[in-house]
Image (cartoon, rainbow, N blue to C red):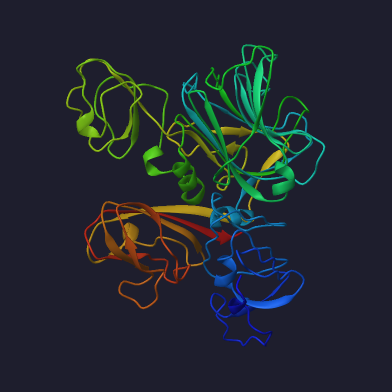
Amino acid sequence: MADSKITALASIGTGTDPANDPLVIVDVSDVSPGGMSATGTTKKVTLNNLLACSPTATLASATISGNSTIGGSLSVTGALTSYTGQVPSAIRAAASDYAAVNFDGATSGTRIVSTLTSQNIGTGDMSMWNRFRVFTTTGTTRYIAALSSSSTAADQARACLLYINSIGGLVFYLYGATVSDFRYGTIAGFQTSYSGQVVDIVVTRTGATLKVYVNGTDTAYTETTGGTPPAWSDTITSTNLFLGQSTGTSNIFSGRIYRSVVFNRALSASDVTELITTGVNPADQWGTQTGQTSGTLVASKRYRITTYVSADSFTNVGAASNATGVEFVATGTTPTTWTNASTLNRIGGLVDLDFTVGAGYQATDRSTNALHGTLFAGVEFTQPKRVAVVYGTTSTATSQLMLGSFSIPTNAIIEDIIVNSSGTATVSIGPVGGGSTVIVNAASVVAGRQKLTIATPFSTSGNLYVTSSTTAVLQFTILYTIAA
């Protein structure tokens, strides 16, 4: 950097603007064209100066407050809270306060099994989302989740498995016609990078393309094959969703799993970001492998034309074209023509085991498919906080009391508010209609689904009054917790 961008060392006042005022930087490697070497010296530069360096800038230590843009690559030794490509999630960060299922890592036969009646994936598109805390012990392979033909052993022909191997790699494994035929992808060093952290792992398959997202980042993996290896597009026999164990006493998971969801569609990168940030989209609630050959659709839900038969027409209800494989969100209920037995499937979550709610020996499936999971010895619910969700809909341009009465306990802490709106509006929420205390203060809402910023995370009255500037239909999902 030029001499004019470096000032003499002087004290920095309390009113320093970190973006524009001089900052003390030690060991700045100045490699800008025509610049002077600053290595080994103490200089003062502005943050904007520093980030304008080309091609590189090296910091021994720095704390940056506010927004900054780095045009090239950035190497960090140590932990980085968030970065472009990996999606920070307040829900994931707070997951330690929520309930989960906890595997003891040792009990023979421990597992959670959900029998996926009539929901076999076969060769179709699919996605799996698992949120869990990465265990800190090393040297043992531990299974997270699997789709398998067996309810007692994950390792079966045509099964797929997600696990962390004995040297800390994250592995997605697909068996072929026998267990001697396989293909798997490994993300090396996964456990070292995420030990003790709550992570979101989403695996997606469309055709022969497999992607593994780690906290929202599409992450490269190394493939290994054996025997007569299956293609990623080969059959998955998903008779059971199998969590936490391989077989018998082998490969038992240790620690907490918070969520496990299986979809009968391949999520896009933006879908994954939304999923791990705000949860399952209402359009994906819920999928089924049972096809429909006539009748009506459910508006705002997602469909796939699984088999198209000539002369049927679905373009008036949202399909971009009439062809096998077309996926769309229904904009209406009645197709122009559906009398020739074209097959449509609702696509989305087939099974959603949300362990942040529940107790006892059954894990509740939040989908409408009633594919509840069974907990075996060695795994149990743990509840540092009780968690609940309230759903409410308003549609007036005045103050409206959600649910028409009390909405949440007065000792509840509101963690997240998500609204799915039919149009634009300015929305406020408070414990009293027209009161000065606000839970959400004049949020600008657009058509679609979004998270609202919470100003005050509780209601002293237990009421939730919604004030909207328009008559847009507002569908609220409110997550709250109560200390156990």
Residue 227 percent coordinates (x, y): 69, 13
Q: Quadrant of residue 38?
A: bottom right
Q: Quadrant of residue 462?
A: bottom left
Residue 65 appears in the picture as rendered:
no
Q: Residue furthest front?
A: 34
Q: Is residue 172 left or right of residue 167?
A: left
Is 98 placed above or below 435 here? above
Look at 73% across and 37% down and name the residue there: 378
Residue 299 appears in the picture as rendered:
yes
Residue 120 percent coordinates (x, y): 49, 21
Asked whether 301 or 4 is in front, the reply is 4
Look at 20% across and 28% down and name the residue there: 335
Is 484 placed above or below 242 here? below
Q: Is residue 94 left or right of residue 300?
A: right
Residue 392 percent coordinates (x, y): 35, 54
Quarter holding the N terminus is bottom right
Is 159 placed above or below 297 here? above
